[in-house]
Image: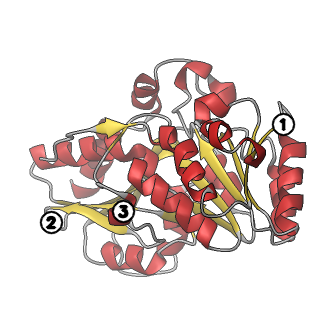
Amino acid sequence: MIKIEKSSAPRVVIGKHLTSLIEKNNKIIVIDNDLGTSTSSADVEKTFPKNFLELGIGEQSSLSAATGLALEGMFPVYVNFAIFASGTIWTQIRQAAYAKANLKIIATHPGLDAGPDGASHQATQDMALMRCIPNMNVILPLDENDVKSAISYALNNKGLYYVRVAREPVPIIYNSPEEANFDIKNKELYSTGDDVALFFDGSSFEQAIASVNLLEENNIKYRLIHVRSLKPLDADNIIEYAKKVKCVITLENHSVIGGLGSAVAEVLSAHKDVAPLRIVGCKDSFTESGKSTELKLKYGVSAQNVFEKVKEVLK
């Protein structure tokens, strides 16, 4: 059984980590839309006020400004809630991608993480919106140290990046960013055998652990794999697992339409002799206000839902 020793909300490290990166690269410009306290990006302003642009509630113009800064050789980092950093500014992001802008978007409060704020703030379609854009990279870091490493990775690689960062506490498994050593390959974290391969996004790690613990209680062997990059997707790794297990499950803090499950289905549909796939995530509906943990249970991002899907395949 996997035991969680310590958890923390990864979003709280964003501002301080960006501050440490600005110390090495003064061309990094952080852009905020009145949510710097919630995302922690406001920590940058305390040390480097000239590198922090508070542009108010004007998301579209802010992303356009970020694109302009990128095209002039700066390193803009746009930080906002995932709902505003994807859907609200989708056209502007598409234009940035068309221009091949070297722009980084850090999206916090993904999926059902913005629980009390209600359906208007819950980004259950953001991965679908982002991965369909050409020239876009979508990365899904795990705990606070993986987030630090992922932000550094994005800034060290040219191009447009969407970095999805959990608002809710995530179990800590890495002791440092160096240990996390973010890359875009899938990473197997735990394994007991080859009945089930469970692929999950970083913000659903707590539910992923609960899922495999429930499987183990029922004598079902598993492999737990963190999908660190949704786009590009580590397709070869997915195929490898799908050919040796009896069941493939995807778990995501996102709609069951268009996200991780859909991406894995696209890969497996082109291959024979692969295990059946079942997609677990937020059901196709608008949600409501409530505690994030309770919403995830109600709308399907849960260990019980994973278990039911596995039983359906292995019966």
Q: Residue at x 82, y 69 (%)?
A: 73
Is the residue 169 above or below the residue 158 in the image? above
Q: Residue at x 53, y 24 (%)?
A: 115
For label 3, the residue is 180
Quote the CA–CA distance across marks 2 and 1.
51 Å
User: Which one is nearer the viewer's eye here, 93 or 312?
Assistant: 93
**Secondary structure type for disc 3:** helix
Q: Amino acid at mark 2?
A: Gly
Indicate which disc, 2 or 1, sits on the residue closer to the N terminus. Answer: 1
Can you tell which mark lies on residue 55? 1
Residue 251 appears anywhere in the view: no
Q: Is 286 left or right of 27, judged from the image as shown?
A: left
**Secondary structure type for disc 2:** loop
**Where is residue 108 shown, x and y percent of the image?**
58, 41
**Where is residue 104 shown, x and y percent of the image?**
69, 58
User: Which one is nearer the viewer's eye here, 196 or 103?
Assistant: 103
Q: Is 232 left or right of 210, judged from the image as shown?
A: right
Q: Amino acid at mark 3?
A: Ala
Q: Residue at x 44, y 66 (%)?
A: 182
Can you tell which mark lies on residue 193? 2
